[in-house]
Image: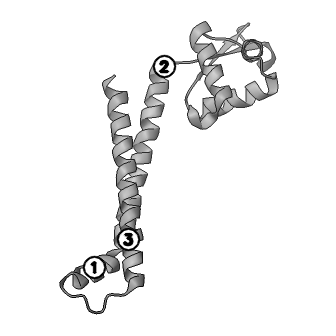
Amino acid sequence: LDAHGEVAARICSILEEQGYQESDAIADSAMIPAKDVREVLHRLYREKCITLLNLQQSKQYNVHNAVYLWGVDMVRTAQTVSDNICTALINIRLRRQHEMDLGKDYIDRAKEAEGTDENVHELDQVNYGKFKQGLERLDNAALQLDETLMVLKDF
């Protein structure tokens, strides 16, 4: 929910405490304009963080007589967060693989230069250092996401 901002976090905590509510009641509880609340609710709904309950007041389907209640399903929200973390982890691994494919020249030159001090260019050393630093950052990000996923699944 961090990606959606403080307003989304406030709305989700209100829905978690008070249960299903209409958008106007959420706006009153959160002390935020109703238009902004509706935008955030729809964005959260598209991201599968909250649920929408459609109650009809008659047997016939009529949009004007319907009552729309918003709520939070914590199991569904946890699954959505878990799916987002897994997607980010896959993207980081794919990015690392792509970077390794691009950096094969740097790796080959570094292996050749290990045996001798000749033909070592400063530009190659600088580029190889940047390449290694980028891989380390990707590895650290993957480890951090893996730990986050483990904590989310275990607790």
> What amino acid does circle 3 point to?
Gly
Answer whether labels 3 and 2 touch (C-beta < 8 Å): no
> What amino acid does circle 2 point to?
Met
* Image depth: mark 3 or mark 2 in front: 3
Residue 70 on image: x %, y %: 64, 17
The first of marks 1 and 3 along the sequence is: 1
Q: In the rendered view, does 134 fall on the left or right side of 53?
A: left
* Residue at the bottom extreme, as displayed: 119
* Image depth: mark 1 or mark 2 in front: 1
Instruction: Give the Cα separation between the discs numbered 1 and 2.
Output: 50 Å
Residue at 40% of width from left, 42% of height from top?
A: 86
Residue 124 on image: x %, y %: 38, 82
Relative depth, front residue between 133 and 29: 133
Q: Residues within 10 Å of mark 1 (few under 14, many from 20)?
A: some
Q: Tell me the residue that label 2 is attached to.
A: 74
Secondary structure state at the residue bearing disc 3: helix
Residue 84 on image: x %, y %: 46, 39
Question: Residue 108 falls in which quadrant of the image?
Answer: bottom left
Question: Residue 6 falls in which quadrant of the image?
Answer: top right
Relative depth, front residue between 37 and 22: 37
Q: Tell me the residue that label 3 is attached to.
A: 129
Q: Residues within 10 Å of mark 3 (few under 14, many from 20)?
A: few
The first of marks 1 and 2 along the sequence is: 2
Residue 17 on image: x %, y %: 58, 9
Residue at 39% of width from left, 84% of height from top?
A: 122
Q: Tell me the residue that label 1 is attached to.
A: 110
